[in-house]
Image: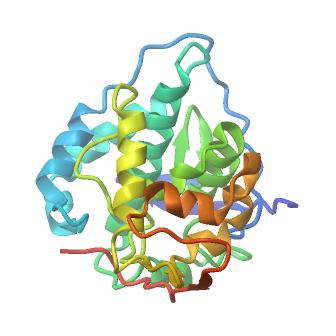
Amino acid sequence: MKTSTLAALVLAAGTLTAVAVVGPGLNPVPTPTLAVPATGALVDHSAYDRLLKKHVNAQGLVDYKGFKADEAIFNQYLTMLSKNPPAANWSKADQMAYWINAYNAYTIRLILNHYPVESIKDIGSKIKIPFVTTPWAAKFFSIGGENMSLDNIEHGILRKKFDDPRIHFTLVCASISCPRLRNEAYTAAQLEKQLDDQGRDFLNNPAKNKISPSDAQLSKYFDWYKGDWQKNGQSVVKWVNRYSTAKISDNTKITYLDYNWNLNKQ
């Protein structure tokens, strides 16, 4: 995708920052050219973990007013993320946990920047930058000195570098039809368990997927990212059966549910 770069002023973690912009949403996004250090101390996600436990309930709904009240602590965590990108000596699990937490945390930051809003998609209409019409394409934060967007993290890093479709069960775009936002941070030690737990939770939640052997009404994720689910000899059917208690087959009628973009607020 050809990148269009323009200057813009965006509120990021409480600071006005000059940024660049790219788009659009589900198209391939170039991998950011981060100046990745060869070695570096691991990031401590415990402050973010405490905020999630305090402001996210068991259903994954967010108390955005509570996050707003704890904004100073939240911004300190985001500043730490910004200054400490994953280093080459970090394990794959440490890097994945970092980027998943970063995506979800900066999504919350984006909502707080424009709060109150009824949907993250409403923010797109507020972005007064030519050629940028979605909030996911706006580069409103920086990591390792590189201006970045949510698209950069999802498509340019997580999908491209780690090739694990389970990330789709973890990235939360602040909407009702998204997977549940865990009320805990992702960590390398728990990552495999957390990824599988997210898969089970997502596939067995009738608000996200309605599954029976004869008829499966699946999340749009399985349509939007069909190529991801089909990699390495896999398929949508195999991934559904990996986590769903109700099993399907190649003969199951598969349709896709409408996506509810309403804010995932308490």
Q: What is the residue that sits farthest to the right in this orientation?
A: 2
Does residue 25 appear to the left or right of 27 in the view shown?
Answer: left
Coloring applied to the structure: rainbow
Q: Where is residue 102 shown, x and y percent of the image?
A: 44, 45
Reply above or below: 65 against 74.
below
Residue at point 81%, 63% (across, down): 4
Say above or below: 41 vs 92. above
Residue 110 position in % (x across, y down) = 41, 63
Residue sitting nearer the eye, 48 or 100: 100
Quadrant of the image occupied by residue 204 = bottom left
Along the line of sight, the residue nearer the viewer: 138 or 130: 138
Is 207 on the left-hand or right-hand side of 183?
Answer: right
Q: Can residue 12 be seen in this snapshot?
A: no
Tell me which corner region of the image, top left, top right, bottom left or bottom right, holds residue 34: top right
Q: Residue at horizontal 64%, vertical 78%?
A: 133
Residue drawn at the location 42% of the way across and 66% of the way down: 203
Between 125 and 185, the one nearer to me in the picture = 185
Query: Residue 36: image x %, image y %?
Result: 64, 23
Residue 39: % across, % down: 56, 10
Report the number of numbered marks: 0
- The answer to whether residue 238 is left or right of residue 186 is right
- Up/down of 194 relative to 171, above or below: above
Can residue 256 be seen here? The reply is yes
- Which image quarter is the N terminus in? bottom right
In the rendered view of the protein, which quadrant contains the C terminus? Answer: bottom left
Residue at horizontal 69 percent and vertical 53 percent from the top? 234
